[in-house]
Image: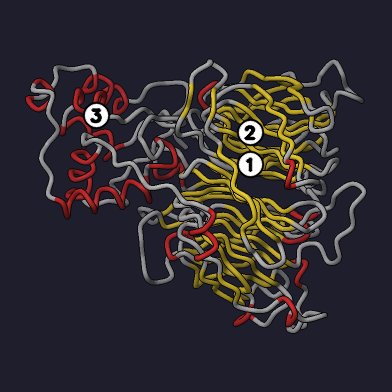
Amino acid sequence: MFKTNHRISALSMAIGLAISGIATTAAAANQAPKMSEADFEKGKSIYFQRCAGCHGTLRKGATGKNLEPKNTIKLGQKRLEKIITYGTEGGMNNFDDILSKSEISLMASYIQQTPPIPPEMPLSLMKERHKVFVDPKDYPSKPLHGRNWKNFFLVIERDVGKIAIIDGDKKEVIAHIPTGYAVHVLKAVEHHEGMSVPNPGRFWYVMGRDGMMTKVDLWQTPDKMKVAQTQVAYDARDVAVSGDGKYVIGGGYWPPHFVILDALTMEPLKVVSARGVNVDGEYVNESRVAAVYDTPHAPTWLVSMKELGQMWQVDYSDLDNLQITEINSAKYLHDGFFDPTGRYFQIAANASNKMVVIDSVERKLEAMIDVDKKPHPGPGANWNDPKCGPVGGTTHLGVGLITVWGNDPAGHPDQAWKVCYTVETDGPGVFIRTHPKSQYVWADQTKSPDDEVKQSIQVIDKKTHEIVKTIRLTEKKGNAAVHIEFNDDGSEVWTSVWNRGDSKKPNGEIIIFDAKTLKEKARVKGLYAPTGKFNVYNRVNHVT
């Protein structure tokens, strides 16, 4: 395998020299290339699908660089095309296996134009886009399919705007459910201290990149599992359900707000703006809501204000008099996970190269841990280390490294919120995962510019900290290995082969491994760009 982290490749050096070189003619004239209206609209669509998540709707930057014309025009057309084509080792994907040469040229021109400002979305419009497909009065009182629904996997089929429901016992796809575009996250009611909801994990709430939130009932027959939906934004990322099962919250990238809905009917109830003053004292118009999580020890949600560098702890016990605690930390807050006790929330501040720890009981900042470039734990991983005791870990978007820190202040105060050790991997990744019954930690390397690396998953021994196996899932150009999830009893590891280009035909698969022997066990085919996978039992029971 090729070691790409902690050193500059020839490609990156070439790109760096190009960026710092003499401006092009267009740049010298301080003018953007001319574009037809049709090309501009095409560029706007591609930007939303492929770029806005990292660079922002208004292109002011966050995880990715600022792409406003004042910066892009200086680089010029040819240099921008090279960067888009080859990517960078700082975490930006190469796009030569996703976009055609003409599309890359078009996008280089598009990001030199003034970014369009999308419209707002009022509550009245959300109510117009609220649809009920199955009346709650008609919900079944028991599962109608005779399957073990607690070991179902809900799988994101990114580019076709669907999720697949897979029977984890039989390895069968039982449904493809239309949802919002490029689903980002799915969540259900989780176990909550002092609250009891019948059949947690039965109802799932799905958030698409287009802000479409969909409610799924796993007790229904496959043709009726989609029971309701509401669009809460034009661009969105996350969703969470209240511990009492009464409310669901959706976080918007644009407009920058969060929306609280009735969890039973999906009727939108309340909109709260995310705009505000950041930790540097500057007003931010595009303050995006990235992560939203229910807190296990209080009737609250933790809502990450990406650009503000704040976590908002939102008390949902009284919607008419909503109480919000603003907790300052660092930018840009992206995604995270709870420690094993459910008290401390560990979230990545990408641009600050920190893991931020929030005490959800005291509703305050607990700690900030210095890590490497652009941490990204995804749903995260907790396990026990021989030296440090309970620990958490993250991959990084900007470097091939796993950072592990102590997260047990009660039992191991000397190790708490300090880096315990690091593991150098072959390339930067997006997801890390384990299971209490497993001796291994699994990590992908999806952000590597090298085909062999990004198509491989690495397996790390919890005791020795050594990489015991590198598993290449595919050798097909344009495909990547992404995301890891265990089955309910921890005996299997499910990994995705993701085709990064658009396709109207099944173009990906899930490869399942024995969690002990690390040998391939089965494959699930017939999937469209499968990415994230969510096991019902594990997610409801906070198994990380």
Q: Amino acid at mark 1?
A: Ile
Where does residue 362 sit, x and y in percent of width and height?
Answer: 83, 27
Q: Nearer the viewer, residue 382 or 299?
A: 299
Q: Amino acid at mark 3?
A: Pro
Pair 3/1: label in front? 3
Q: Earlier in the sequence, mark 3 or mark 1?
A: 3
Where does residue 104 sit, x and y in percent of width and height?
Answer: 22, 45
Q: Earlier in the sequence, mark 3 or mark 2?
A: 3
Determine whether the residue tagged by mark 2 lies in a helix, strand or loop: strand
Q: Is residue 442 visible?
A: no
- Where is mark 2, residue-wise? 394
Q: Residue at x 63, y 66 (%)?
A: 215
Q: Residue at x 73, y 32 (%)?
A: 392
Q: Residues within 10 Å of mark 3 (few under 14, many from 20)?
A: many
Q: Amino acid at mark 2?
A: Thr
- 113 relative to 300 in the view: left or right: left
Q: Are marks 3 and 2 in contact (CB under 8 Å)?
A: no
Where does residue 536 sit, x and y in percent of width and height?
Answer: 73, 61
Q: Are marks 2 and 1 in contact (CB under 8 Å)?
A: yes
Pair 3/2: label in front? 3
Q: Nearer the viewer, residue 393 or 470?
A: 393
Q: Quadrant of residue 167?
A: bottom right
- Where is mark 3, residue-wise? 69
Where does residue 69 sit, x and y in percent of width and height?
Answer: 24, 29
Q: Nearer the viewer, residue 318 or 468?
A: 318
Q: Residue at x 59, y 62 (%)?
A: 155
Could you tell me how far apart the alpha carbons at marks 3 and 2 are, in whole angstroms? 34 Å
Q: Residues within 10 Å of mark 2 (few under 14, many from 20)?
A: many
Which mark is on residue 123?
A: none
Which mark is on residue 432?
A: 1
